Amino acid sequence: MWIGIDDTDSPAGMCTTYIGAVLVRRLEHAGIRVVDTRLVRLNPNVIHKTRGNAAICIEAVGDLEAAFDLVARCVEELAEFDNPMTNPGLVVSPARPPPEFYYAALRDFCTVDEAVRLLEATGALYRGYKNRRGLIGATAAIASEFPDKTYELLAYRKRGVWGTPRHVDARSLFRAEEMTYPHTWDTVDQENGVVVGVPHTPDPVLFGIRGESPAWVEMARSFVRSEESAFEQVYVTNQGTDAHLIPGSIGTLREGRSYMVGGRVIGSPKTGRGGHVSIILENNGAEVRCMAYEPTKGFRDVVRALLPGDIVVATGSYKGGSLNLEKIGVACLADAVRVRPPVCPACGKRMTSAGTGKGYKCRTCSERSREAGIERIERQMRPGWYEVPPSARRHLARPLVRGIPQWEEDLRQSIREYDTPSSQVN
């Protein structure tokens, strides 16, 4: 059977992954064998999400109705029902729904009615509470397939200390990443000296470690010194896979979806209030603004280094008319040139302006020239991929340490066919 739960938490507390971990233990205690546990991230742009828009899927073997009763009791005991934005949903199904529903919930938007029709067709037992919105994520979770997958170890706090400051030794987290990177990632942000794997919200999570296998996340965990955890759970996930991205075209982007688009930089990057940096990409006469917000820190310097004529691929969520950048792939760099007075062919001295519209004159030997000197400037940037730091990375965004999927690299290569005119730097 496949068990799905979603929308059980709120900004004030709880975590759907915690309920999933509790369920694993209660199912096994009841004689229902757990085969697999999944943490399924869905569309990060859904406005009703609490934090990371995560649902849980548990694959198990046992009595369907007994499992449904146990899941319902667990959700009713632990979910944040008092919060008006929390609308839990739970599903126990003897068959896995088609994965198309998962991809729709991952990259687009779904309705409760669509989820219910699918559940009825698969003979699932299900229950939605309040407005039943959690049925969408619960259904998507059991329909999920992971062509690419990662793992996350989550340690949970003892109930008596929920809402109090967490005691996790930051140095041990940096040590954990030092000893296991690149097989684990995003435990800390080395460049900015920030701990990433410890939340600041009043939920039951103590810390999390992401990596390429259960063995690697467990090895990293062995270096962490912290308050005693209540229990720990390793989930297989779609985090860090770019599964949310859709190949798109500038001019056809739809609000609330995440895209990868290619285009030419037009105009110079602009730094706005708050330190946010923007560029404009153009493709076939259509334009889109791309944003690197202040929390992306040094990534903004990458965006600032772009010049008109650069050919790039940009990834991110399209919201409010802007593509909020997660990564950028530089395919071709435009020539950067500086216009200067020419060097005198007679004496080798640099000429000076002879006046508006009068060209240039050598002060040493009075030689004249009508043509300016064009000096090519070496670009410090190189073609390749650049990403936001771990402290600003979304759950689904694939870190460069994991490599680039072939379809993404193919798109970066394909836009090399653009003409790349020189751009001038004054």
Image (cartoon, grey):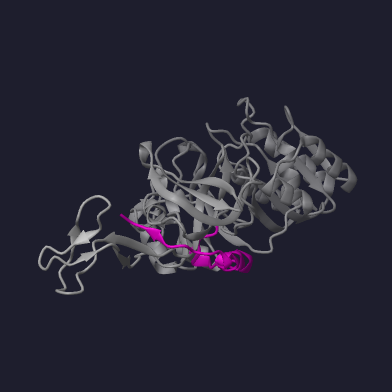
Q: From what the image shows, is residue 176 above or below residue 139?
A: below
Question: Which stretch is magenta?
Answer: 398-426
- Picture quarter containing residue 131? top right
- Give the left or right position of residue 95, taking residue 171 as reference: right
Residue drawn at (60%, 26%), measured in percent from left and top? Answer: 83
The image shows residue 278 at horizontal and vertical percentages of 44, 45
Q: Is residue 139 magenta?
A: no
How many labels sit on residues?
0
Q: Position of residue 424 (x, y in %)?
A: 37, 58
Q: Quadrant of the C terminus?
A: bottom left
Give the answer, above or below, for where 100 lies relative to 47. below
Q: Is residue 78 left or right of residue 330?
A: right
Residue pictured at 60% horizontal, 67% vertical: 414
Q: Nearer the viewer, residue 167 or 202?
A: 202
Q: Can residue 413 be seen by looking at this rendering?
A: yes
Give the camera-side residue of 164 and 239: 239
Q: Position of residue 58 (x, y in %)?
A: 71, 52
Residue at 69% x, 60% y is 146
In this rendered view, identify the residue nearer to me: 219 or 363: 363
- Where's residue 35, x and y in %? 72, 60
Q: Is residue 409 magenta?
A: yes
Can the viewer see residue 218? no
**At 56% from the left edge and 58% from the top edge, which residue is drawn?**
240
Nearer the observer, 333 or 74: 333
